[in-house]
Image: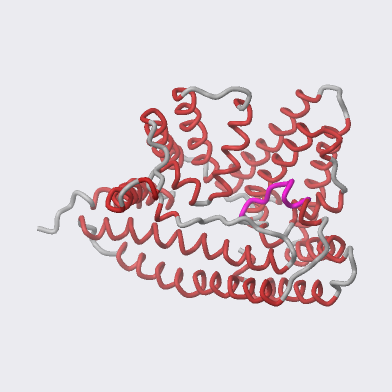
Amino acid sequence: MFYLNMNALLAMCGMVFVLMATRKWPQNKRILMLLFNLGFLFLWSGKLFAFYIAYTLLNYIFFVYLCRTPVWRKFAFALFILANIGAVILFHMLGKQGSASLLADGVMTLGIMFNVLKIIDALYFAYFFGKDGQAKVIDYVNYILFVPTFTSGPILKFRDFMADVKVPYKVDASQFEAGVKRIILGLFKKVVVVVWMTDLFNKVMDQELHTHQSLFLMIWFYLMIYMDFSGYSDIAVGFGRLMGITIPENFKKPFLSPTLTQFWRNWHATLGDWFRDHIFIFFSRKTPSKLMTAGLSIFIMTLMGLWHGFSWLFLIYGVYHGVIIAIENLLGKTTVIRRKVSKPYFYMRCLLTQALVVAAIIINLNNPDVVLRVYKGLFHLPF
């Protein structure tokens, strides 16, 4: 959301140049980043600033408790996670009702969807590493409020961010060039390509839908989502790296995924990684059976669907993907190694995976009437 606002873009560019100008100061990345993150949120919205100061500091107290206290650690760990999940549910409900209250702020709602995942990751780190997982409040606040990834990710891992902030700011000419190019590519996708694609999508939707038009809309919408989310990720990666923070890649050639399991490792990769890391970790002491893995796949994908929105459509979307991934697990077909199979077989599997994705992608519109109209159009022959 921030990247479509010119003032926000200029502010982030300004931050990059300030960091470059003060690169000889060892603490510039930590202290100046804190001032920037807080100042940016304050100028964007006083409500946003006030909420996140309270929310972040409260969770830092939770974090410190898990690091230092041996008393009631398991209970506290579960309680803190449930409290944050409850916050997400509350924001979803308020956003759906269109409430004008403080808690229904649009940017706030988007922010908490991603930041709660970071908070839970930090709680995991504190719980499993104890005193060795402690972090200073300045670094914790920067981790949660890091502006380039605030509303739409990619999702930063706590341990990776903590490692980055300890390294002095160093961005050479080649890294600067690469970062700028990445930002320009992302802006081109979002401001030019997505706008044009959206306009064409709406024009076709206004027509009477037949088989070929519904197929076109489903494929077109899939490509449009890719351009939109990957464009945002490109900008976030570019600005993050210019600020001295390594932002993980969110899209890793998803169109060349020969299985749905591999697709979700390549499409919105940081989200998929987060759910796998924080669900499967409870089963890491022993190798799960195929049946257990299949069940976990359905559970995780259902959670991912509901994370996108509390509706029957997203529930169906998550279960759909979960069932297919479960079948891949049961059949031992979760991975196809490109160099070990023939090219025709590999690309056939990629095409099959893309067809499975396209079959349900229109659900992301989250509008029952529109989704049903597109699916009905598939069976409406033009003759």
The answer to whether 285 appears left or right of 208 in the picture is right
Left-right relation of 261 to 244:
left
Seen as rendered, the residue at the extreme front is 340
Q: Nearer the viewer, residue 76 or 168?
A: 168
The magenta stretch is: 154-162
Q: Position of residue 303 (x, y in %)?
A: 53, 36
From the viewer's perspective, tell me whether residue 261 is left or right of residue 216. right
Determine if the magenta segment contains residue 157: yes
Residue drawn at point x = 85 percent, y = 45 percent: 135
**How many numbered marks does the figure carry?**
0
- Reply above or below: 182 against 301: below
Relative horizontal placement of residue 293, taking residue 270 as reference (left or right): left
Residue visible at 59% across and 75% down in the picture: 181
Q: Is residue 188 above or below residue 44?
A: below
Above or below, 330 against 245 in this view is: above
Q: Nearer the viewer, residue 376 or 275?
A: 275
Protein image colouring: secondary structure
The structure residue drawn at horizontal position 77% and vertical position 52%, both measured from the top left corner, is: 163
Residue 350 in sight here = yes
- Please say whether residue 135 is one of the residues in the magenta stretch: no
Residue 336 percent coordinates (x, y):
39, 43
Q: Quadrant of the N terminus?
A: bottom right
